[in-house]
Amino acid sequence: MKKIISRLLLLVFLSLPFSRSIYADQLTQSKPRVVILATGGTIAGSAASATQASYRPGVLSISQIIASVPDIEKLADLKGIQISNIASQDMEERIWLELWKSIDHLFSNDLCDGVVITHGTDTMEETAYFLNLTVRHTKPVVLTGAMRAATSLSADGPFNLYNAVALASNPISANRGVMVVMNDYIFSANDVTKTHTVNSDAFSAPGFGAMGYMRDGAPQFYRENSNTHTSSSVFDINGVKSLPVTEIVYAYAFSSAVAINAIIDSNAKGIVIAGVGHGNYNKEISKAIERGLSRGVAIVRSSRVAEGGVDLAAENYDIKAPVSFNKNPQKARILLMLALTRTKDCAEIQRIFAEY
Ligand code: SIN
C-alpha cells in the first residue's frame, strides 16, 4: 500500500508540478540547476559496521545521501527525486521508462540544466546506454553510484556524487552523450562497462578508455563520444509502454541449443548471442540461429570477450545475422530492442549497429 501511495505521489509530482513557479522557489538562476534522480544501489547502501563487506543496497533516501556530501550545494541548486530505491539487479523496464520520462520533462520545460542519476553499479552501464540512445536533448545526464556502502569506512559514494553534480552542472559537459562518473573517471555510456565485481575502481571502457577525468570539481575531457547519441538519436520512445522482448544467449564449450530454442519458442523478438571469441558459436547454436531467423526473430552476434568486438569478417556460418561491432552483449541487447521498434530488416539492423 505504502509503495502504491509513493508511486502515485511520484506520478503526480512528475506529471504536474514541474512548472517554473515551483522550481523558481527552490532553484535560483545564479547557480546551475541540477536534479538528482535516485534509483538506489550501494550508494544508498547501509551495513551493520563500517568495515564489513556485506550490506543492504537501496536503504538511504536521496536527501540523506545529499546531506552526506560536503560542499555539494555550492556546485548547484539541487533537487533530489526518489524514483526507486532498489538494488540494480532488480532494475525494471518500467523504471527506465520513468527515468526517460522525467528527464524529457525536465529538459523539455527547461526546469534544470543537468540531471544526475544515482544507480546501483551492477546494471548502471545498461541504464546509461538506454538513456544515451533515447534522451533527445543536449543537456548533460550523468550516472554515478558506489562500490562501498554509504556507512562504510572510505565510502566512495559521496565523492562520486560530488563529481557527478560538478560534471552535470558544467556547460562543457553538454552534447557529449550520457556519461558515467566513477572513481574520478568520466566514461561514455557508449563503451563503459563494469570490469571488477567489488573493487572501488570497478569501471572501465575496454579498447576506448575514459572520456576524461574529474579534478577539483572540474571535468578534463580527453576525447569525444563518436557514435550517434542523445539529441541526434532517432529512437523516439515517447508513449512507448514496453520494448520488444530481447534476450541474451551465452556461448561456451559444447553449449547446447536448449536455451536459444526455448527463447525462439517464447514471445522474444530478438536474441543477442554472447559468442566465444569473435562472436562464434558451435553447430548446434548455428542451426538454432537459422531456425530463429526463419521464424522472424532478429539475431545479433556479439562476444563474451571484453575487448575487440565483432566485425563483419565472419569465421563461419550465419552471415545473415548482424554483428554488434563494439557493443558488449548487454548493450547490444538494448540497441537491438530499440532497433526493433523501427525495423525487422537485418540489413537495416546492421546499419543501426554501425551508427550507434
Ligand atoms: C547494485 O547494483 O545495486 C548493487 C551493487 C552496487 O551498487 O554496487
Image (cartoon, rainbow, N blue to C red):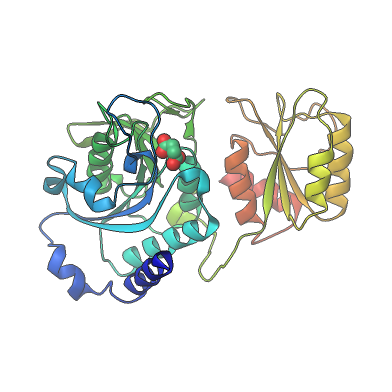
Viewer-closest of 201 and 105: 201
Instruction: Choose top left, top right, bottom left or bottom right for residue 34.
Output: bottom left
Which quadrant, please, contains the N terminus? bottom left
Residue 77 appears at what percent x and percent y? 16, 55
Ligand 1 falls in quadrant:
top left
| Residue 170 in view, yes or no | no
Residue ID at (77%, 42%)? 321
Q: Is residue 18 above or below residue 214?
A: below
- Left or right: residue 283 versus residue 329 is right
Residue farthest along the front direction in this orientation = 48
Residue 49 appears at what percent x and percent y? 29, 29
Tally the marks: 0
Residue ID at (68%, 32%)? 311
- Left or right: residue 294 versus residue 329 is right
Viewer-closest of 209 and 288: 288
| Residue 109 in view, yes or no | yes
- Left or right: residue 133 versus residue 104 is right
Residue 347 appears at what percent x and percent y? 74, 50
- Left or right: residue 271 versus residue 308 is right
Q: Is residue 117 above or below residue 209?
A: below
Instruction: Choose top left, top right, bottom left or bottom right for residue 285.
Output: top right
Viewer-closest of 33 and 247: 247
Residue ID at (45%, 46%)? 128
Residue 170 appears at what percent x and percent y? 23, 46
